[in-house]
Structure formats: structure tokens, C-alpha cells
């Protein structure tokens, strides 16, 4: 049984991280820390665990932390937790800069702790089966993906997320599809990008081996135009990934993946090093398109 603390007090920390850990058979939620002590106390009371005013106090009680804070804050906290030799269940994007992401990955490696980055689509059992059984046996010339939603609309639980307003779909949504396209088509060697209306971004990857993929993403899409899709084409024809945004089963699988990495000392392929790889390609797209903050 791995003892977990949650770092964060917002909507996602509550409905996904704390709730998921409390229900997991191989995890024990023992405490919550947040930058706002009052919010931490309220969330801890809701889940019947202790709230800690100091991060160090929580780290002393746990084996691992599950982090649900803005990515720039996450990078700082992840380094502190890894230096304290605590295992890490992290959110995407790992950070908002390559330097910060690389520092997390390097600290994790130096400390010898296990890490998993919760790329929701990569932790769907159906997506992993598709990657191994459908994508793996064939050669693919390219791929195309859409992630269009209205997560910043006033009625959305993410509408008050400052970092999403500042950094848009490029940093929030593109990592989801990049985390599937990289294992499907290979590492990204070149990146192109262009802006569209509002926060819409169009990104093109050239993968090792020559395949090319593209992603169009937006957090400000009119509701009627919402779409989640990823498909590949090649000698086997067109294949579409089985995608869904239900987070409950994928989060449980992410917790299980971290527990397995701790018990076996075998790194998970979706670890902090992979998270840093995704940050590198997103940062390259941002530089190319000069997407405004």
C-alpha cells in the first residue's frame, strides 16, 4: 500500500486526484497540502484526511505525491518532492519550459524515485491496446488529430484556470495528442506551428523515419464544433484511435502504473523523462508560432 499526499486544492485535485486515490486498492490517501491553507483544510475535511500547512510535513508522512497544481508550480514542487525521495504522480504538461521540465526529469533520475505523468489518453486501456495491437504491427505515413472544446467557457469547471487562459490549448491540449503520436510514429525531429482564432493552434510534427502528423487544438471552440479525434494512415489504411475523456479509469491506471514502477524499479514509459520530451516539442511549437501568452 503506497501512502499518497495530494498537492493542490482545486477542482481537479478534488474530483480526480483525491477521489481517485481514496478509491484505489493499492493507495492510501493520508494528507493534502495547498498554497491556500483554508482550501487545503476544506478539501482534506471532505476526504477525511489531514491538511498540512507545510509541504515538508506532508512529505514526511507519505511515500508519494499526486500533484494537481499549475504546471509552473508543479515543476518546483516536483523537484522538492523528488529531492525528499518521494515518488511522483504528475500532471501534464510537466512544466511550461524545457529547462524546468528537464530539471524535474534529472532530479527524478538522480533521486532514484519513480514517476508517472498523467496523460489521460495514454492511460486509457483501449488506447494502449490500440497502440500495441493495431498501430505497432504496421508502418504509418502520418497522422492527424483534433482536440476542440470549450473548456474556458463560463460554465466549465476549468473556466477560472489562469494558466489555461494565459497559455491556451497549445500547452493544455496538444500534450494529450503528442503523448499518443510520439509512441505511434516515433520521436519528433521538426516542428511547425501557426495560430488560429482565439487560442486555436495548428501544430505539425515530422517524426523520425519521415512520418508527419498534425494537431489542431482549441479551448475556446464553439460548443457545436467540439471534437476529439486522432487517426493514422499508411499501408494498413486509416485507423482511428479509441479516445474518450472519462478520467476515472485512466487515473486509476496511472496510480497502478506508479505503484508498479515503485515495486519493480522498472520505469514507466510515461514517466518524467517522457513528460520532458513532450514539453520540448510543445515549447518548439510555441517558439515557432509565437503563440501569445
Image (spheres, grey):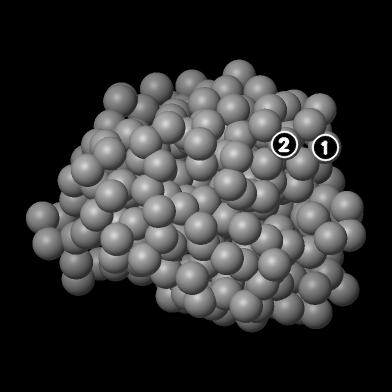
Residue 7, quarter of the rendered image: top left
For image coordinates 77% across by 41% down, the residue present is 113
Q: Position of 230 compared to 142: left or right?
A: left
Q: In the rendered view, tell whether residue 54 sits above or below residue 100.
A: below
Report, in whole angstroms, how far the alpha carbon at label 2 lies from the one at label 1: 8 Å
The secondary structure type at the circle numbered 2 is loop
Q: Position of residue 95 (x, y in %)?
A: 52, 32
Residue 57 position, x and y percent, is: 51, 36
Image quarter of residue 147: bottom left
Percent across and percent down for residue 175 are: 53, 47
Q: Are marks 2 and 1 in contact (CB under 8 Å)?
A: yes
Give residue 121's position: percent from left, percent from top: 56, 65
Residue corresponding to mark 2: 85
> Measuring 79% from the left and 31% from the top, which residue is drawn there?
111
Q: Name the image quarter holding the C terminus.
A: top left
User: What residue is disc 1 on?
Assistant: 112
* Label 2 Cα neighbours within 10 Å, binned few <14 / some 14-19 / many ≥20: some
Is residue 32 among the parts visible in the rendering? yes
Quadrant of res 171: top left
Amino acid at each position: 500500500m503506497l501512502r499518497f499526499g495530494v498537492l493542490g486544492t482545486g477542482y481537479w485535485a478534488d474530483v480526480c486526484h483525491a477521489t481517485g486515490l481514496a478509491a484505489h486498492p493499492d493507495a492510501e490517501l493520508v494528507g493534502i497540502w495547498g498554497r491556500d491553507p483554508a482550501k487545503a483544510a476544506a478539501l482534506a475535511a471532505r476526504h477525511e484526511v489531514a491538511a498540512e500547512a507545510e509541504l515538508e510535513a506532508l512529505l514526511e508522512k507519505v511515500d508519494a505525491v499526486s500533484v494537481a497544481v499549475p504546471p509552473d508550480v508543479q515543476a518546483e514542487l516536483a523537484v522538492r518532492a523528488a529531492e525528499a525521495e518521494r515518488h511522483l504522480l504528475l500532471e501534464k504538461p510537466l512544466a511550461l519550459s524545457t529547462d524546468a521540465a528537464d530539471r524535474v526529469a534529472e532530479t527524478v533520475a538522480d533521486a532514484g524515485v519513480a514517476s508517472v505523468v498523467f496523460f489521460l489518453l495514454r492511460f486509457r486501456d483501449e488506447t494502449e491496446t490500440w497502440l500495441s495491437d493495431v498501430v505497432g504491427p504496421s508502418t504509418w505515413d502520418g497522422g492527424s488529430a483534433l482536440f476542440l472544446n470549450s473548456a474556458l467557457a463560463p460554465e466549465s469547471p476549468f473556466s477560472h484556470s489562469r494558466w489555461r487562459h494565459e497559455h491556451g490549448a497549445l500547452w493544455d491540449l496538444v500534450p494529450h495528442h503528442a503523448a499518443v503520436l510520439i509512441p505511434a510514429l516515433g520521436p519528433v525531429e521538426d516542428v511547425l506551428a501557426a495560430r488560429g482564432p482565439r487560442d486555436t493552434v495548428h501544430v505539425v510534427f515530422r517524426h523520425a523515419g519521415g512520418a508527419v502528423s498534425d494537431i489542431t487544438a482549441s479551448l475556446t471552440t464553439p460548443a457545436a464544433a467540439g471534437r476529439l479525434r486522432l487517426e493514422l494512415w499508411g499501408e494498413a489504411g486509416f485507423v482511428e484511435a479509441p479516445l474518450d475523456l472519462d478520467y476515472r479509469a485512466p487515473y486509476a491506471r496511472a496510480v497502478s502504473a506508479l505503484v508498479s514502477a515503485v515495486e519493480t524499479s522498472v520505469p514507466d514509459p510515461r514517466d518524467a523523462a517522457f513528460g520532458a520530451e513532450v514539453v520540448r516539442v510543445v515549447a518548439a511549437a510555441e517558439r515557432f508560432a509565437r503563440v501569445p501568452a
